[in-house]
Amino acid sequence: MYPVLFHIGNFPVRSWGVMVVLGILAGLWLAARLAKKENIAPEKVVEFTLYAFYAGIAGARLWEVIWGWEKFSSHPGEALKFWSGGLSIQGGVVAGLLVCIWFVRKHNLSTWKFADVLAPGLILGQGIGRVGCLLNGDAYGIPTNLPIGVSYKEGTPAYAVYGAQPLFPAEIIEGIADIVILFILLRVYRRKPFDGAVALYYFIFYSIVRFTLEFWRSDSLLILGGLKVAQLTTLGTMLLALAVVFHNWRRKKMENHRA
C-alpha cells in the first residue's frame, strides 16, 4: 500500500487524494454526458460538483467525527486531519443530497431528472475512490485466512491496528461492486420507468452492498444490537427508497390503466 505516492519538494502527494480527484473527474464526465440527454446544461453539473465537493468532504468528515467522537475527544485537533483517513461516504452523500436539493431549487431544475444524471457518476467516483482507500490502508476488513486477504504496510491505519496480518479486502470488493452497480444504473437509465428511478436504484443497490460488507469491515462503529452505524443508516435508506419506488410504480400503473 502506498499512502504517499511521491513528494514534490517537501509536499507529499497522497494516493487517496489523487484517486478522489480522478473519481470526481470521471464522475463529472459521465454526469455531463447524461445531462445532455435530459436537456440539462453540462455547465450546471460542473457548478453543482464544485459545491458538492466541498460539502461532501465536510459532511464525510463530520459524520465520522460525530459517530466516532471517542477517538477524537482527547485530541480534538485530530478531527480536522481528514487526509489521514476517516471520511464516511454516507456523510458525503447526505451532504451532497442537501446541496442537490438547494441547487435544483435555485436553478429551477427537475429534482428527479437531475438526481438521475448524477447517480451513475457518483457510483463511478465511489468505485475509483475505493482504490484510494486501498492504497491509503483505510476502510479495511477484519483478519482473514482466505487467500484473498490483503496485508498492509507500516504507516497505514490498517497496519496500526492489525500489523501485517492479512485482512478481508473490503475496499476491493466494494470497488468492484460499485462498478457492477454502475452498469446496472446505466441499463436502468436507458429505459427509465419514471424520473428518479436511477437515483432510487442507486440508493437501494449501494445500501445492500454496504450493509453486507459491514459484517467484514473492521473500522466501523457498533451502535445497537451488534449492528453498525453504517448498517442502520443504509437499512433505513434502502427501505425508504424501496417505498418510493413502489409508490411510483403503483402510480404509473394506475395512470396507464386510466389511459
Image (cartoon, rainbow, N blue to C red):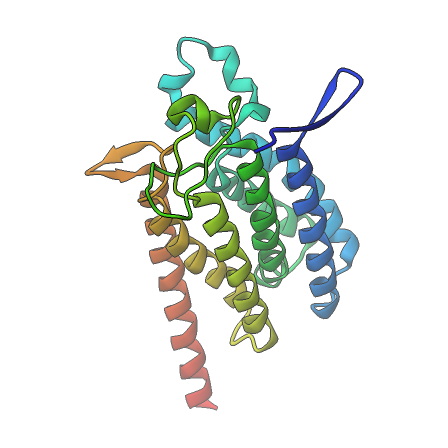
- Residue 14 drawn at (x, y percent): 66, 29
Q: Residue at x 59, y 39 (%)?
A: 132
Question: Which residue does the image show at 47% across and 50% down from the upper left?
Answer: 174
Q: Residue 208 location in percent, x, y?
A: 38, 56
The quarter of the displayed image where residue 123 is located: bottom right
Look at the image and tell me whether residue 72 can be seen: yes
Please state which of residues 225 and 133 is positioned toward the viewer in this rendering.
133
Q: Quadrant of residue 158?
A: top left
Question: Which corner quadrant holds the N terminus?
Answer: top right
Query: Which residue is at 50% across, 18% downward?
Result: 79
Residue 55, above or below 250: above
Query: Does residue 51 show up?
Result: no
Q: Position of residue 115 (x, y in %)?
A: 58, 58
Q: Name the one closer to the observer, 158 or 129.
A: 158
Q: What number of labels is visible?
A: 0
Q: Which residue is nearer to you in this view: 210 or 49? A: 210
Q: Is residue 80 above or below residue 225?
A: above
Residue shown at the point (72%, 27%) measured from the top left:
6
